[in-house]
Image (cartoon, rainbow, N blue to C red):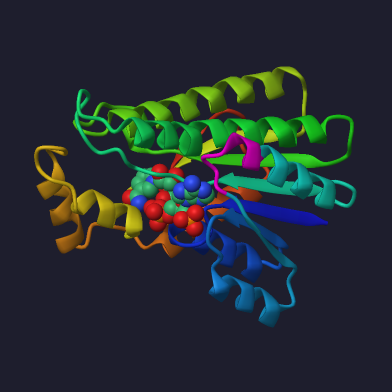
Amino acid sequence: MNYAIITGASRGLGASAAQRFISDGIPVITVSRNENSTLKHAAESAGISYTHYRCDLSSPQQVQSVFAQICDDIFQHAENVYVINNAGVIEPIDVAGELDASLVQTNVQVNLTAPILISNLFLQKAKGTGTRVIIANVTSGAGERPIQGWSIYCSTKAAVNMFTMTAGLELENNGSSSKIIAFSPGLMDTDMQVTIRSSSEEAFADVDTFRNYKESGNLRSPDTVAGALVNLVLAENLVNGKIYKVNDLL
Ligand SMILES: NC(=O)c1ccc[n+]([C@@H]2O[C@H](COP(=O)([O-])OP(=O)(O)OC[C@H]3O[C@@H](n4cnc5c(N)ncnc54)[C@H](OP(=O)(O)O)[C@@H]3O)[C@@H](O)[C@H]2O)c1
């Protein structure tokens, strides 16, 4: 049996990816603070197993306990486990020296600590079993260049890239059948972009550029991007540790 576990599937890219797994007949487990009832109904209509776990990914304790339970539920019968570490936050948007300390901590925990803890747990559970774990960490082009006002988001995505490259190297050197990759989804028309457009110019120098992206129709639909992401993780020829970019896949 195969399973897809998707964090942050209550909306945006995660919701679209979960919908695509359901359409492909793959049982889905979603993890976020809110549940997406459309996904629940879609799974019911399609006769596909669907479970939602409520979890605040900014709490390492909740991450450990919720994902330990998910592993207990699935590992006995799992052949392939697709883990999509998608949940993310952009805030705090502000220049260094003006950052809100609590938002800094939340960003690091949701964007970086949670994907590391989740990847670590699944790779540990897969050892010595016949289960193959395929992990996709959703990253951003912001992890590869500095953007004024996004120091924390740029830093956490850069660290996700380095974690993915290093864990991918380790899996390759160990001859593991499991894979870990990063996926850069490009600009998408989601709530994260709404948050970006609502920034002040003092906090985010490029805010007008991002307002123009929306006005000129330059944001991709999350359904289109999710199609590329799910096709990628279902493919047999994934390269461990690689950072895949949506523009190269569509
Ligand atoms: N949108 C873009 O243009 C863009 C560009 C590059 C990269 N990305 C990346 O793509 C991924 C998806 O982004 P998106 O645009 O779809 O974002 P979004 O629409 O803002 O959705 C974010 C998701 O993350 C979840 N989340 C946030 N904080 C959480 C927490 N504390 N605990 C649990 N879940 C939490 C939310 O669920 P709940 O609120 O229900 O908990 C929601 O489902 C992110 O990793 C983002 O960095 C986006």
Give x and y (percent) for residue 138. 48, 42
Give x and y (percent) for residue 84. 59, 47
For residue 67, which quarter of the picture? top right
For residue 119, which quarter of the picture? top right
For residue 230, which quarter of the picture? bottom right
**Depicted 200 relative to depicted 43: above or below:** above
Whether residue 170 is visible to the viewer of this picture, yes or no, is yes
Q: Residue at x 55, y 28 (%)?
A: 164
Q: Nearer the viewer, residue 38 or 178?
A: 38
Give x and y (percent) for residue 148. 19, 31
Give x and y (percent) for residue 104. 36, 32
120 horizontally vs 69: left or right: left
Residue 133 located within the stretch drawn in magenta: no
How many discs appear? 0
Whether residue 247 is visible to the viewer of this picture, yes or no, is no
Q: Nearer the viewer, residue 207 or 176?
A: 207
Question: Range of the magenta residues?
Answer: 56-63
180 horizontally vs 195: left or right: right
Q: Residue at x 10, y 49 (%)?
A: 208
**Depicted 238 relative to depicted 46: above or below:** above
